[in-house]
Structures are given as C-alpha cells and as structure tokens.
C-alpha cells in the first residue's frame, strides 16, 4: 500500500479527535522535552502531523533549522499555514525514505513509530539513525503497552479503526526500544502520561 496521503481524510479533524479522546495529554507529552533542544540546532521532524508541535518548537527555539517530513499532503498544508511558511523550515511530502542526505542534531518522532509493524521497525529506526550526527538527540513520544484493560482496549480499537480506514497496517505496538539502544542511543529521560499509556522519551548518542 502506498504510504503517502493515507491520513488525508482525517487531517482536518485529527487534532479535534485527539483532544476529544485524550484532552491535552498527548500534546503535553510531545512538549515535555522541548527545552532539551538547543538554539540553532538542525532538527528533523518525521511525521509532524498538522503542525501544532512545529508551531510550539519555533516559539521556544525560533533559531532552529527544521526539516519537516509528513506523509499526508493535507497535514503538510496545515503545517505550512500554522507557521506561515517560516523560512527556517523545509517541508517535504514523504516518509523516512525521503530523509535528505543531511546529518541532524535532533530528530523528533511523535506517535510515528507506532504505525510500523514489527517486521519493518528495525529498518525504519536504522534509517533515522543514519541521518543523525554522532552526537545527537532523539525525542520519541508514543503509546506504551499497558496492563490496564482500559488502555489495552483503547489501543486495540485505535489500531482497528486505522486499519479499517486503510491508514495503518500495523496491529500492535512495535518493540522499538532495543533497536534504538543498538544504534548507540542511551535513555536520558522518560515521563509517563495518561496513567502510563503514553510516554515522552529523550535519547542521547554521544559517540
């Protein structure tokens, strides 16, 4: 299945739908390690969505240079509008396969790794890793496997919903942490939200 534009149908409603289900929790999780990004850093945002996070990043660190990659053309258009085509941002309609041949200081994947099935996640993580400098940071916000039946039910329904609509082929959360560790990244911070169902993660590679 073509991975481009699978989220176009929900782009206009995505933020409202997320707020309806989770309130501001997912947004707060994405912002948790925002201050770990230094001024003038080169930042890769993969799967940026409608641009809400991008807007916040440029407010906190207006000097950063951003490559913003989004698979949905509709989401990309919304992002451009939110930041008024900021000259510090290069917008790319694509996926991890379209990451430019640039070494970045920081990569941000907010609720991105969860869309890949387990048999693809290693190649995705490795592709992202090769785009980063030797000393770099990776901010990952995503869902967690939880023991609470409410969370397990929500996760099952979310995957079912997006599979039925053709947006996602994965059926469960992939195990991305061991692969990130193998790529030389070490955890420097983690914060749980929504009763442990969501986590914000900061990984650092120093060699």
Image: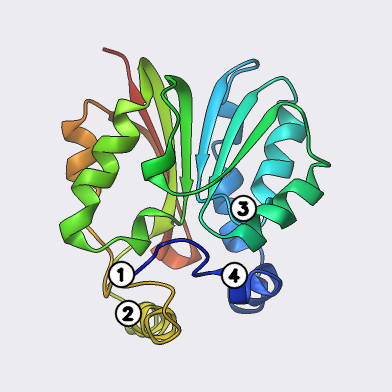
Dot label at residue 28: 3
Residue 139 image point, x, y percent: 45, 38
- Cα distance in 3D space between marks 2 and 4: 27 Å
Total numbered badges shown on the rendered structure: 4
Residue 11 falls left or right of residue 192: right
Q: Are marks 2 and 1 in contact (CB under 8 Å)?
A: yes
At 41% across and 66% down in the image, what residue appears?
197
Using the image, determine if residue 72 lies above or below residue 188. below
At 55% across and 21% down in the image, what residue appears?
42
- Cα distance in 3D space between marks 1 and 3: 19 Å
Label 3's element? Answer: helix
Name the residue beneath numbered marker 2. 152
Name the residue beneath numbered marker 1. 146
Residue 92 falls left or right of residue 101: right
Q: Nearer the viewer, mark 2 or mark 4?
A: 4
Residue 186 falls left or right of residue 166: left
Q: Nearer the viewer, mark 3 or mark 4?
A: 4
Label 4's element? Answer: helix
Q: How is the image coloured?
A: rainbow
- Marked residue nearer the N-terminal end (2 or 4): 4
Residue 193 falls left or right of residue 31: left
């Amino acid at each position: 299945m073509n991975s481009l534009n699978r989220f176009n149908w929900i782009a206009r409603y995505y933020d409202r739908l997320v707020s309806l289900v989770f309130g501001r929790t997912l947004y707060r999780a994405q912002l948790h390690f925002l201050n770990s990004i230094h001024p003038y850093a080169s930042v890769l945002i993969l799967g940026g969505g409608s641009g809400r996070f991008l807007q916040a990043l440029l407010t906190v660190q207006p000097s950063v240079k951003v490559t913003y990659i989004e698979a949905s053309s509709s989401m990309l258009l919304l992002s451009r509008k939110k930041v008024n085509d900021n000259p510090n941002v290069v917008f790319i309609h694509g996926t991890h396969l379209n990451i430019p041949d640039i070494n970045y200081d920081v990569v941000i994947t907010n609720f991105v790794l969860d869309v890949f099935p387990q048999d693809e996640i290693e190649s995705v993580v490795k592709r992202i890793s090769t785009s980063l400098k030797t000393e770099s940071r990776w901010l990952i916000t995503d869902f967690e496997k939880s023991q609470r039946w409410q969370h397990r039910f929500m996760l099952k329904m979310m995957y079912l919903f997006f599979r039925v609509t053709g947006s996602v082929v994965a059926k469960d959360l992939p195990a991305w942490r061991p692969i990130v560790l193998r790529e030389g990244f070490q955890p420097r911070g983690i914060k749980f939200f929504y009763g442990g169902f969501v986590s914000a993660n900061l990984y650092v590679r120093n060699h």
